[in-house]
Amino acid sequence: MKPIHHSIRLPVSHDKALRALAERHGISVYAMLQRSVKTGIATLANPPVPDINTREIVTELASVSTRIVDVERMLDRALFTACAAYCYARSAAQATRKSDEVITAEINAAYDRQRRLSHEGRK
């Protein structure tokens, strides 16, 4: 088989990558260029067939993601309810005659504090 000569121009970034690969493999830049062209042609000629399992995995991940959002909402509501129960119980235990507006402000403050603490725990 007679090789055919092609002249190509590469962007500087591709040239640097090509030289780095050639050095890593211990071959010349030209040999690495030939290897890259052969591999690229083979990949383009025989593209990987999309796997059905991959689509199933993506579908399941989307489903899990939706469920996680629902769980987060439920946990958020449970946190708010727990803060409300705590604030009303504390007010009753202290036998103070606080108005609902004052207790509501305490509930919101407790809720915000717990949310802030949970976000700090993620860092």
Image (cartoon, helix red, strand yellow):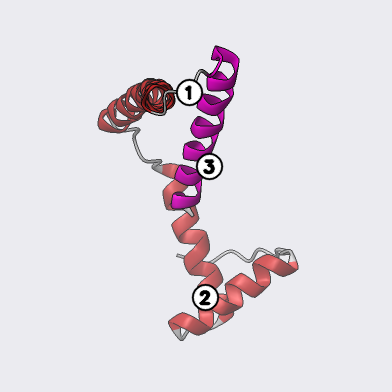
Question: For numbered disc 2, what is the local secondary structure?
Answer: helix
- Please say if the residues under marks 1 and 3 sit with CB atoms less than 8 Å apart: no
In three-dimensional space, the C-alpha distance between marks 1 and 3, rounded to whole angstroms, equals 28 Å
Q: Residue at x 45, y 43 (%)?
A: 118
Crowding near the residue tagged with mark 3, few <14, some 14–19, many ≥20 C-alpha atoms within 10 Å: few
**Among numbered discs 3 and 2, the one appearing first in the sequence:** 2
Instruction: Specify the amino acid type for callout 1.
Output: Thr
Question: For numbered disc 1, what is the local secondary structure?
Answer: loop
Task: Report the residue marked by disc 2.
Answer: 21
Residue 117 in magenta stretch: yes
Query: Where are the magenta residues, as a range?
Result: 98-122
**Among numbered discs 1 and 3, the one appearing first in the sequence:** 1
Crowding near the residue tagged with mark 2, few <14, some 14–19, many ≥20 C-alpha atoms within 10 Å: some
In three-dimensional space, the C-alpha distance between marks 3 and 2, rounded to whole angstroms, equals 48 Å
Task: Report the residue marked by disc 1.
Answer: 96
Residue lying farthest top?
Answer: 100
Q: Which mark, by number, is residue 116? A: 3
